[in-house]
Amino acid sequence: MSGDKVKSYGELLIANFLSVHGVSFEYEAKFKSQNITYTYRPDFTVFKDGRKDQPIIIEFFGIDKDGNVKPGILPERYKNLTQKKIELHNNEGSDFISLYYY
């Protein structure tokens, strides 16, 4: 609906939900922080009242309720990256929404 190409069915559902409800977003926009030295692109960035200085970050984690990931994904690496993202947003004080596959 939004026209964005996404990487998973879960992300497609999120993009469609945001679009249907009139919420503008950027898909995989670069996250700006002086506290990291790597490039990080969260799944969705929504801006409060259209203000780029007040982002809401949405990450969709492909982990089920039992902690499993889809075949072909290295589970420990994926879980570590998930935890790293959560910790980053806790440290940044970001408005952060984490969604899971269940």
Image (spheres, rainbow, N blue to C red):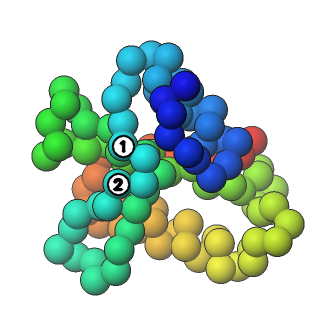
Q: Residue at x 37, y 24 (%)?
A: 23
Left or right of 6 on screen, residue 48? left
In which quarter of the view is residue 32 placed?
bottom left
Image quarter (top left, top right, bottom left or bottom right) of the N terminus: top right
Residue depicted at 66% across the width and 41% down the height: 10
x then y, percent, for residue 31: 30, 61
Q: Are marks 2 and 1 in contact (CB under 8 Å)?
A: yes
Checking the image for residue 84, the label placed there is none
| For residue 2, above or below residue 63 | above
Determine if residue 96 is in view.
no
Residue wearing tag 1: 26
Left or right of 92? Residue 52 is: left
What residue type is disc 2 on?
A: Ala
Give the percent coordinates (x, y) of residue 16. Answer: 56, 27
User: How would you rate the neighbour count of disc 1 (Cα within 10 Å): few for under 14, some for 14-19, many for 20 or more?
Assistant: some
Residue beneath the point at 25% across and 56% down = 93
Residue lying furthest front in this view?
3
- Check disc 2: other Cα within 10 Å, few if <14, some if 14-19, many if 20+: some
Relative to the observer, which residue lies in front, 82 or 1?
1
Question: Residue farthest to the right?
Answer: 71
Where 69 falls versus 25 (above or below)? below
Where on the picture, by quarter, is residue 91? bottom left
Q: Position of residue 33 (x, y in %)?
A: 21, 68
Work out whether 9 lies above or below 15: below
Could one spot residue 22 in this view of the protein? yes
Please state which amino acid type lies under the numbered disc 1.
Glu
Q: Residue at x 34, y 29 (%)?
A: 24
Quarter residue 89 falls in: bottom left
Q: Secondary structure at mark 2?
A: loop
Q: Is residue 77 left or right of residue 95?
A: right
Q: Which residue is mark 2?
A: 29
Question: Disc 2 to disc 1, how far (Cα)?
Answer: 6 Å
